[in-house]
Amino acid sequence: MSGKIVNLSRVRKTRARDVERQRADANAAKFGCTKAERAADADAADKAARHLDSHKRESDPE
């Protein structure tokens, strides 16, 4: 019985950390987007807003 002595608390914490890391990686792949994609989305939204504003009718303030 000359096995390695293991601290069970440390093993539990390491296992929990690994599970959380895997879950975080899965969420990043599922929901995450790159900085370039966010910038492209913001540019598209700005362009759509400008396009909509340019087609608004002017109202007479009578």
Image (tube, rainbow, N blue to C red):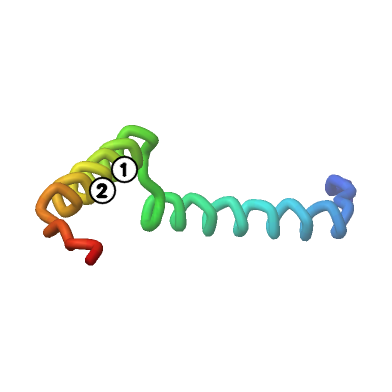
Q: Amino acid at mark 2?
A: Ala
Q: Residue furthest top?
A: 36
* Pointer 1 residue: 42
Quadrant assignment, res 44: top left
Q: Secondary structure at mark 2?
A: helix
Observer-nearest residue: 9 or 54?
54
Residue that appears at 32% across and 33% down: 36
Q: Which numbered tag is attached to residue 27?
A: none
Quadrant of res 39: top left
Percent position of residue 43, x then y = 26, 39
Badge 1: few (under 14), some or many (20 or more) residues near its Cα, within 10 Å? few
Locate residue 26 relative to residue 57 in the image: left or right. Answer: right
Residue contact between numbered discs 1 and 2, judged by CB atoms under 8 Å? yes
Q: Give the camera-side residue of 11 and 38.
A: 38
Query: Relative to residue 9, is residue 20 drawn left or right?
Result: left
Gap in Å between the C-alphas at discs 1 and 2?
Answer: 5 Å
Q: Residue at (37%, 57%) from the top-left corner?
A: 30
| Viewer-nearest residue: 16 or 32 | 32
Q: Residue furthest front?
A: 62
Q: Residue at x 39, y 56 (%)?
A: 31
Q: Which mark is residue 45?
A: 2
Residue 40 x %, y %: 26, 38
28 to the left or right of 61: right
Compared with 59, 2 (above or below) is: above
Q: Residue furthest bottom?
A: 62
Task: Residue 29: give x, y in percent of width and height.
Answer: 38, 51
**What amino acid type should be assigned to the residue bearing mark 1?**
Ala
Element carrying mark 1: helix
Q: Is residue 8 above or below residue 44?
A: below
Quadrant (top left, top right, bottom left, bottom right) of the C terminus: bottom left
Q: Position of residue 28 (x, y in %)?
A: 44, 51
